[in-house]
Amino acid sequence: MSLRLDGFSDNPMRSRADFQDAARALNKPLIPFLDRGGAALDLEEGAAKFDMRASSLEGVVRPLWGLVPLALGGGAFSHWPLFQRAICEGVDPEHPRFWGAIGDVDQRAVEMAAIGFLLAALPNEGWDQLPETSQEHLVNWLSAMQKVPMSQNNWLFFTVLVQQGLKRIGRGDIVDLALEHKHLQQLADWYRGDGWYGDGGSKAVDHYGGFAMHFYGMLYGWLKGDQLDEFSVLFRKRASEFAVPFSHWFADNGEAMIQGRSLTYRFATAAYWGMLAVSGERPLSIGQIKGVWARQLRVWRDRPIFRSDGILSRGFAYPSLMVCEDYNSPTSPYWAMKAFMPLALDEASDFWQADEEPLDDLRSVYAMPHADSLVQRVEGHAISHFAAPIHTWLQMDKYNKFAYSTVCGFDVGSLQYANMGIFGDNLLAFSFDDGANWQMRQKNLDVCVADDNLTVRWSTGALEVETKIEVVGDGLFTRSHAFELSVPTQVVETGFAVNQWYREAERLDPADAHQAILLNGENALSGILPMDDLPRQSIACGRVNSNMLSPRTLVPGFSLSLAAGNHQIKHGFWLSPDKREEKCEAFLALQKGH
């Protein structure tokens, strides 16, 4: 059977009715599981690190992020009684399908936010239809989250959203207002500047800035309505400031920057743009906001992201557990439903009446010091040269690559097969024991972003390195690394992976170049060449099921054997999504210029 979904994969996604159909289509495959399992919904495909009842809770309530806007905009949906029944079961301590009481730093807190949103925005479906006993169970179950520790990151918004729901149904008497203010202040304090948030004290930069911090901040202000407070005003202002820098994370075709954790949420990357439209903020024209939102959703129509029964799979561009976090259960991908907030807007709104427009005034190079990164445009795509904080408690590859892009994806488990000479993309790796063990960037120590350059001092844990990245042309850039070795060491540096899912990548190494590697894949041309006089060996690493975009990729790189002492190595890189071979001369000129 096809891993595509009727009503989504074949949907033109142009009109409001089209997107309503897409939201309903995504939920349709869940209905038999909800009907059969109720609050104990089970997609029968593995687990996450949290218990299965929390996974069931995910499966019941994550669809609400799309269904609530659908209903607010007058969209028909005939299965509300199933969701209401499941909620009644799940919050009843005496019911065999009880979701369980919330504990410390509990996954239930994440999903409670969706019910808080339901109560605050759509009480006629989330509250009025419930029996009185179930209403009391629901209030007791939700309000308990005010008494347990939360993860110190975007999770603090979950308590705030539940509190808004409790206020809307007339239970403001049990809302801890001091806690609400404390959480809002903590969230506000994690702002980095120029629109960028860090997700908690780690100051990590990723899509959580858009589909979590800004999304919830704007949602909080929208739910407040005319009762604005200092935080709703602040969150809206910051969300507006985020539009221009964040727009540089999107390709002309709608593809988002492929970087960071939780990418199995897929088109949740469009959630910021949809919520921006609903908030009423207009930092860009409404046609541009609509355009980037709609194009990002349309990117997903041609990808095999569904199980054979139509359930969203775990993975990114194809089903793959390797690219997932340990907190991604079979029901987790439905956070993608957050993309559908514009369905709450009336057909006559400026959003639905606007024609889609392309993003304009995108800079060829955009220095983002508040995100510790430098974004480079190339042939309608984007490359992020990256040095923001690294999440070491997750797959480090999602934060420690020197470059991410909208066209090549990236590898996880980049050093998993390093002892076999197979490495992931965009890394610098060291082995001090003849290739038995390898290290790559683990922590950034100091970062400077200025003009077309990024300089970062970083550590593998055993070795400090200073890396300078310089953008030098259309798709062209260099990376130089300075370090001191105490023992003989093997060093490997790699470039962008090319897709060879259905067609083998070709090596087009130029005959007149000294060891330059040029790979022609299904998605792009990717090149790397030496810019120093050190001896090295070229490598082309075949990777399987580790790249976000393709289960078969080829990664170009070089291997060097260095003696103890001070060293500086330098490579030039080229990425061409349109595969413009005529620009190869500019690539080779990097080497000649050295």
Image (cartoon, rainbow, N blue to C red):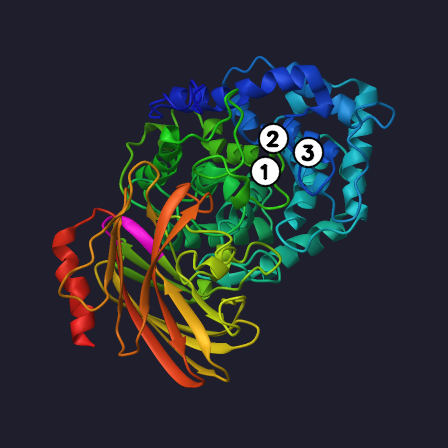
Q: Residue at x 30, y 78 (%)?
A: 534
Please state which amino acid type lies under the numbered disc 3.
Ser
Residue 61 lies in quadrant: top right
- The residue lying at 43 percent from left, 50 percent from top is 240
Pointer 3: residues within 10 angstroms few (<14), some, or many (20+)? many
Residue at 37% x, 58% y: name it.
384
Is there CB contact under 8 Å for labels 3 and 1? no
Instruction: State yes or no: discs 1 and 2 in contact (Cβ < 8 Å).
Output: yes
- Quarter of the image where the C terminus is located: bottom left
Q: Which residue corresponds to mark 2?
A: 121
The residue positioned 82% from the left and 28% from the top of the image is 137
| SS state under label 1 | helix
Give amino acid for label 2: Ala
- Disc 3 and disc 1: Cα gap in Å? 27 Å
Give the mark nearest the N terminus, 3 or 2.
3
Residue 495: percent from the left, percent from the top?
34, 59
Mark 1 belongs to which amino acid? Answer: Leu
Judged from this view, the residue extending furthest toward the bottom is 565
- The image position of residue 187, as x and y in percent, is 61, 55
Identify the main secondary structure in magenta. strand
Residue 557 shown left or right of residue 217 in the figure: left
Q: Which residues are magenta?
A: 378-383
